[in-house]
Image (tube, helix red, strand yellow):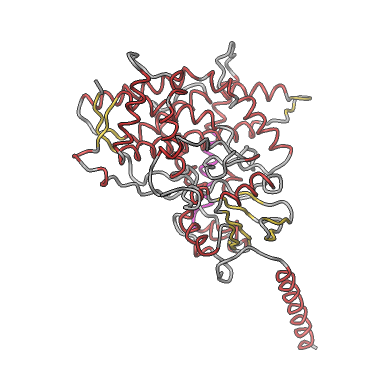
């Protein structure tokens, strides 16, 4: 009798296995590399996933299906495939998978970046686009940008006067953080112990968001995240940010802000009150704190990454640096300072930034999407629940799109209208479609102003008379691709 039961179970298992295989055989799935039991293709994703996925795509094509544990993952590595995902079928691929780390850090994904696609996300994105990052709002913070970039120049000038080496990475990170603190929270925290801790926690947040969580892909091995200490680290980080942001909200509620000098917290608290009914708002404190954390993750780390890589490339290419300095200095004329009014005239500066973004996408794999229904992409079947990784870094180096793609050559952008705002899929450093970054205007004007002021005021060299080829431009690991080592320079005043 027992033997008969085992035989019945075996036959049921065999039938289901065969049925599953038959169903898969009927579908035309994207090409896939061979996978291992349990882990699938996870062993083929190294410490720099954008590079290892690019290597796999050269063998298996621009649309490639991997398995991360039990989860199907579609890897997109061409402009045409990205257009299909982020434009033609944008509504189908606008969801976000529920991942343990961002879900905990952002209050159950109550933010804009990781919130699931739906009414709540539409409301939060509308607040960001129309209230926090509108052109009018970005322009209203012009004085903050100009003050903080001038302060950066003064600090570099003092180091120059004392013949000290300048850690330009630190200077640019401080600039991005101080500007956003003033814009979002109303004041800077960098000069206090709490501010230093805040900066360290932001760095840890970005590192955590780039950390692989076993339980997301192999649920029965989720205990590894607990035993390894990962869950504990995430919990500690989330609680620290919650205490800090709670104190910020309390401080803002105790002050009556009048006039137009409102920061993001003031604006969000006003929106919260406007959406209140019977003493309960549809926009809770957790949503406000989640959005603020989004702003800092996107508005500091990725912003200074772009400036850091741009300066590194200019140091490696002195002819480009000289050409840019000439443009900026001619635009400044006899003026003491370059201002935002001058930026529209600086066409070569804009080309330099486009080329920097092409080679050094701040978040090389963008943020993972998820399909909400079965569909076809470029003739291949893609099932609902498939995660989608768009390798924007690989697209920016595609030899089918770019001549000599590994070369830093801003001139390639002087004779075409390719832009990075989500309309041209060969250059998508900030994503595109519904899930495109809403803060492009904010980041662009700060980046351009900061670099213009630096090359206007100073000439730069590497320390100890090092040659341009000695500059190490290795990448760090993590969701944001930074220089692995700080960018150290010698700055001399331009006279």
Q: Position of residue 409 (x, y in %)?
A: 39, 41
Magenta-drawn stretch, dominant element (helix, strand or loop): helix
Near-viewer residue (14 or 470):
470
Task: Specify whether residue 233 is in view.
Answer: no
Residue placed farthest to the top in the image? 259
The residue stretch that appears in magenta: 228-243
Q: How many marks?
A: 0
Describe residue 55's horizontal placement relative to residue 13 as left or right.
left
At x 47% / y 34%, what residue is drawn? 300
Near-viewer residue (293 or 362):
362
Q: Position of residue 431 (x, y in %)?
A: 57, 42
Q: Quadrant of residue 23?
A: bottom right
Describe residue 157's horizontal placement relative to residue 225 as left or right.
left
At x 62% / y 47%, what residue is drawn? 83
Is residue 238 a member of the stretch shown in magenta?
yes
At x 32% / y 26%, what residue is drawn? 326
Task: Specify whether residue 11 is in view.
Answer: yes
Q: Quadrant of the N terminus?
A: bottom right
Q: Position of residue 3 (x, y in %)?
A: 76, 88
Near-viewer residue (104 or 410):
410
Q: Position of residue 462 (x, y in %)?
A: 24, 38
Describe residue 297's horizontal placement relative to residue 346 as left or right.
right
Q: Quadrant of the C terminus?
A: top left
Q: Is residue 141 above or below residue 298?
A: above
Is residue 110 a member of the stretch shown in magenta?
no
Q: Quadrant of residue 308?
A: top left
């Amino acid at each position: 009798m027992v033997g008969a039961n085992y035989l019945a179970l075996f036959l049921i298992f065999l039938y289901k296995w065969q049925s599953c295989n038959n169903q898969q055989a009927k579908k035309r799935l994207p090409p896939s590399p061979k996978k291992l039991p349990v882990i699938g293709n996870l062993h083929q994703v190294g410490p720099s996933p954008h590079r290892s996925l690019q290597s796999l795509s050269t063998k298996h094509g621009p649309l490639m299906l991997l398995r991360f544990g039990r989860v199907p993952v579609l890897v997109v590595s061409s402009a045409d495939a990205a257009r299909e995902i982020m434009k033609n079928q944008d509504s189908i691929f606008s969801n976000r998978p529920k991942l343990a780390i961002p879900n905990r850090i952002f209050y159950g994904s109550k933010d804009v970046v990781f919130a699931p696609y739906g009414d709540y996300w539409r409301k939060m994105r509308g607040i960001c686009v129309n209230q926090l990052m509108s052109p009018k709002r970005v322009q209203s913070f012009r004085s903050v940008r100009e003050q903080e970039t001038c302060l950066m120049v003064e600090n570099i000038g003092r180091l120059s006067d004392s013949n000290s080496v300048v850690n330009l990475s630190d200077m640019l990170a401080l600039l991005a953080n101080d500007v956003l603190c003033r814009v979002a929270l109303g004041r800077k925290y960098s000069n206090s112990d709490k501010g230093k801790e805040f900066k360290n926690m932001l760095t840890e947040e970005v590192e955590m968001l780039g950390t692989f969580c076993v339980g997301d892909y192999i649920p029965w091995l989720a205990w590894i995240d607990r035993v390894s200490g990962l869950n504990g680290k995430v919990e500690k980080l989330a609680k620290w940010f919650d205490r800090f942001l709670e104190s910020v909200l309390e401080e803002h509620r105790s002050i009556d802000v009048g006039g137009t000098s409102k920061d993001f917290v003031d604006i969000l608290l006003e929106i919260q009150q406007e959406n209140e009914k019977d003493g309960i708002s549809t926009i809770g404190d957790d949503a406000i704190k989640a959005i603020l954390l989004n702003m800092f993750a996107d508005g500091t780390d990725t912003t200074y990454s772009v400036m850091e890589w741009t300066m590194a490339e200019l140091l490696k290419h002195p002819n480009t640096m000289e050409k840019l300095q000439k443009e900026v200095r001619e635009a400044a004329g006899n003026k003491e300072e370059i201002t935002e009014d001058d930026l529209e005239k600086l066409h070569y500066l804009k080309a330099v930034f486009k080329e920097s973004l092409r080679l050094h996408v701040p978040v090389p794999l963008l943020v993972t999407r998820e399909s909400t229904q079965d569909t076809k992409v470029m003739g291949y079947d893609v099932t609902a629940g498939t995660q989608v990784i768009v390798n924007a870094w690989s697209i920016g180096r595609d030899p089918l799109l770019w001549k000599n793609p590994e070369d830093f050559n801003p001139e390639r952008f002087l004779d075409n209208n390719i832009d990075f705002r989500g309309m041209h899929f060969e250059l998508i450093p900030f994503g595109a479609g519904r899930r495109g970054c809403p803060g492009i205007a904010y980041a662009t004007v700060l980046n351009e102003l900061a670099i213009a002021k630096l090359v206007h005021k100073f000439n730069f060299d590497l320390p100890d008379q090092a040659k341009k080829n000695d500059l190490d431009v290795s990448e760090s690991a993590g969701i944001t691709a930074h220089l692995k080592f700080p960018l150290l320079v010698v700055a001399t005043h331009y006279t």
